[in-house]
Image: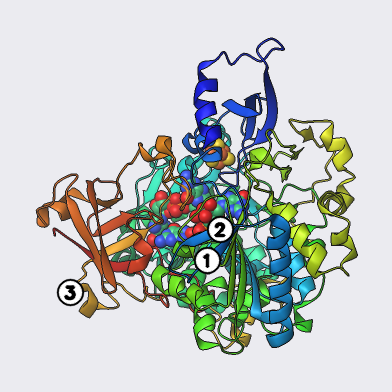
Amino acid sequence: MGAVAKTGKAAQQPKVPSRGSGVEVRKTICSICMSRCGIDAYVKDGLIIKIEGTRENPHSKGTLCSKGAAGRQYVYHKDRIRTPLLRKGDRRSERFEPIEWERALDLIANRLSQIKSESGAESVVFYAGYPKWMRPFLKRLALTFGSPNYCTESSTCSRAAAMAAALNYGAMGIPDIEKTRCLLVWSKNPFYSNTSDVRKLLDARERGMKIIEVGPLITPMTAHADIHLRIRPGTSGALALGMARVIIEEELFDLDFVENWSIGFEEYRSYVEAFTLQETERITGVPEELIIRAARLYATTKPAALMTGASPTVHHTNGVQNHRAITALVGLTGNFDQEGGNYVLPPAATGVSNGMVTRQGEFEQPRPWEEMPPRIGEDRYPVWCRMVGEAQSIHLPFQIRSREPYPIRALLGFGMNYRMWPGSDFMRESLEMLDFFVAVDLFMTDTAKMADLVLPACTSFERSELKIYPERHVIWTTPAIEPLGESRSDADIIFEIAGRLVPDDHIMQEGYESCVDWILGPTNLTLDQLKRHPSGYQVQNVQMPPYKKYEKKGFRTPSGKMEFTSLILQDAGLDPLPRYEEPKLSSYGTPQVSRDFPLILTTGARLPMFIHSRTFRLPWSRELRPDPMVDINPFDAQDRDISQGDWVDLCTRRGSIRIKANLTEIVMPGVVNMYHGYPEADVNQLIEPDYLDPISAYPGFKSLLCEVRKP
Ligand SMILES: Nc1nc2c(c(=O)[nH]1)N[C@H]1C(S)=C(S)[C@@H](COP(=O)(O)OP(=O)(O)OC[C@H]3O[C@@H](n4cnc5c(=O)[nH]c(N)nc54)[C@H](O)[C@@H]3O)O[C@H]1N2
Ligand SMILES: Nc1nc2c(c(=O)[nH]1)N[C@H]1C(S)=C(S)[C@@H](COP(=O)(O)OP(=O)(O)OC[C@H]3O[C@@H](n4cnc5c(=O)[nH]c(N)nc54)[C@H](O)[C@@H]3O)O[C@H]1N2
Ligand code: SF4
Ligand SMILES: [Mo]
């Protein structure tokens, strides 16, 4: 609290860095989203009095989005946890008392060791929410401890898309935006979700790149698009198959690639026959004429690249097959691993692929899965566990309840938010059933309030962190300010626990910085070197891999080729074709439900000022959209006698929430859109916990049925 008051006063004083003013500019990065924009923190007397974007950061180039600009409100928020807290009383009492760090860490080590000896290491889960920078250390800790149950928020994020593409190709390429002539943007809105990537896109547009946008919503991209295919939510797969039919029928496909580098083409060709223009329009709502134009433009403009969102195509009960159908277009048109097409790069580190090679993968996986008990979800979602190096966290509440195939008793959660889950109340109640739950977070969240032990983490302003940018710029930050209260870096917490729990892991016992050096090994960069470049270091002479690597190495699929029919899916008894099925709740598939719930609900399309649960509490973010609102088309609103700003009930078969109506043509008639994560109006309560894609277990967040009613 003191810090907040002082910041207020300090904010009145001159903010010019000089010896006389006592103001110093320290280089750091924003931790609110994955982009990690460079930040100049103006620090006086140990407090941040102002922030600006770092101009010399080649990724963000001095810009900050509205969330990042509110960074001081994030760092100094009154909800920041200041000390480790131990629960007093039962899970619902919300009574805690501060305890010392040493006691807290010993308690964790003792409880986890005890649980391991009683019911096996696998009954302990190591979880990371959206924050990703500490994951390699957490995963290594879990696996060395002996638990295969390392899982993350990526069980609802980009992994299913990566997995679907990998079923087709072994690995997916990134869109080569700088060199492409046509960009097929399939459900991604970087203007809100990845602001620091937009400049590159607009530059390409200015030099003449065509844009085809696919997605049910009107977005800032729509104004820049040559064609917008406004699909009914959940029907991406059908649209992709319909486009494929045009491309094949008009012989616009790459015959050489298909003949020499793929399997299953004939089955695929005969399957897409069913997706006539008429049928595709009926399913997707996209006019025939636009389907033809888009298919021709994408297939005949060379090179063309596909850019998909991290999650909107897979947040459906038919998500993996939808995404397979979409990505099949890349091989079909000969744009796979091509200059200006989709270029395959190995992952570097911190979630970025830029040609650099590190040892992050090796670091994270100290032992193979085969040596360990099955992961959570492995029996139900074997393809997920075969393709993705994590347990499936969406299955976690089910296993906590069923205790099958073995009990889950403890959970160490870094940035865990139960509202991420469909049926969030179901997840919340499942957490109550644990014997021991530790929450590590910045803020005293509703999830942290359920923990037995709460540990205060600090923000990126208060810690050291490695970030590798797509531009091959690397930064190792040093704290701009001391950690607030007794908060600590997640990395320090993980290494303290590792010191107690896995003394035999010699690499981890060397400490955080040594491990980062170890990961960076192949790059020849060292932290000593990076420390001399506080705003980051531009790596020179990265050997970029060639295009068309498959010509020498084949594809990393079972057949060694691109698979229109997936052998892995076939092996698992699933349909090998990218078959289209209606979402489990849809006006065509379940007319009996749509009688009472005639509107399609899509949730979570990104808003610029919010990021999941995190920025609702910041006054600058909140005032941009103060009330939870459902976007509804004026036609649907009129039918229901609803006006702008009216309080309405958004209802599904599972329940309802009261929110305000936002009348907008961003959504088409018949579709409503609601952002997730509001603490006071949680849309995930309205979704069944088992409303999932059968291959990936991804929730159908973006296509279900609902109604909007006046109370
Ligand atoms: N400001 C902000 N930025 C974020 C986040 C945030 O919460 N806030 N979250 C981050 C995370 S974790 C992620 S995963 C990314 C996601 O970011 P993006 O991948 O850009 O995804 P969205 O904004 O959810 O959706 C993009 C577009 O998908 C389309 N879409 C919506 N429903 C459907 C549907 O049913 N089917 C299809 N095919 N398309 C649909 C819409 O037209 C929408 O505009 O953003 C990241 N960046
Ligand atoms: N209905 C619906 N639900 C969705 C989605 C959707 O589109 N619709 N999107 C899904 C997707 S794609 C995603 S990625 C998930 C995201 O889901 P979550 O992982 O729930 O994301 P957040 O709420 O941003 O972050 C979780 C917690 O991490 C804490 N945190 C932030 N930084 C740090 C840190 O450095 N250290 C620690 N220890 N904690 C930190 C935050 O305070 C917060 O409590 O939501 C999913 N849920
Ligand atoms: S895009 Fe915004 S929230 Fe994300 S790192 Fe940059 S400034 Fe922070
Ligand atoms: Mo995500």
Task: Name the residue that disc number 3 marks.
Answer: 595
Q: How many marks?
A: 3
Given the image, on which type of amino acid does mark 1 rest?
Lys
- Say if residue 297 shows up in the picture: no
* Pointer 1 local density, CA inside 10 Å: few below 14, some 14–19, many at least 20: few
N-terminal-most mark, 1 or 3: 1
Q: Nearer the viewer, residue 37 or 115?
A: 115
State the separation of the CA atoms marked 2 and 1: 7 Å
Q: Nearer the viewer, residue 102 or 620?
A: 102
Given the image, on which type of amino acid does mark 2 rest?
Glu
Residue at 44% in and 41% down: 608
Residue at 79% in and 83% down: 371
- Say if residue 397 shows up in the picture: yes
Task: Name the residue that disc number 2 marks.
Answer: 97
N-terminal-most mark, 2 or 1: 1
Q: Position of residue 435 (x, y in %)?
A: 57, 78
Q: Position of residue 472 (x, y in %)?
A: 75, 40
Task: Name the residue that disc number 1 marks.
Answer: 88
Looking at the rendered image, the disc whose residue lies closer to the viewer, 3 or 2, is: 2
Q: Nearer the viewer, residue 423 or 224?
A: 423
Q: Position of residue 535 (x, y in %)?
A: 73, 30
| Residue 639 - label | none
N-terminal-most mark, 3 or 2: 2
User: Is 36 drawn above or below residue 300 in the view shown?
Assistant: above
User: Is 361 drawn above or below residue 574 in the view shown?
Assistant: above
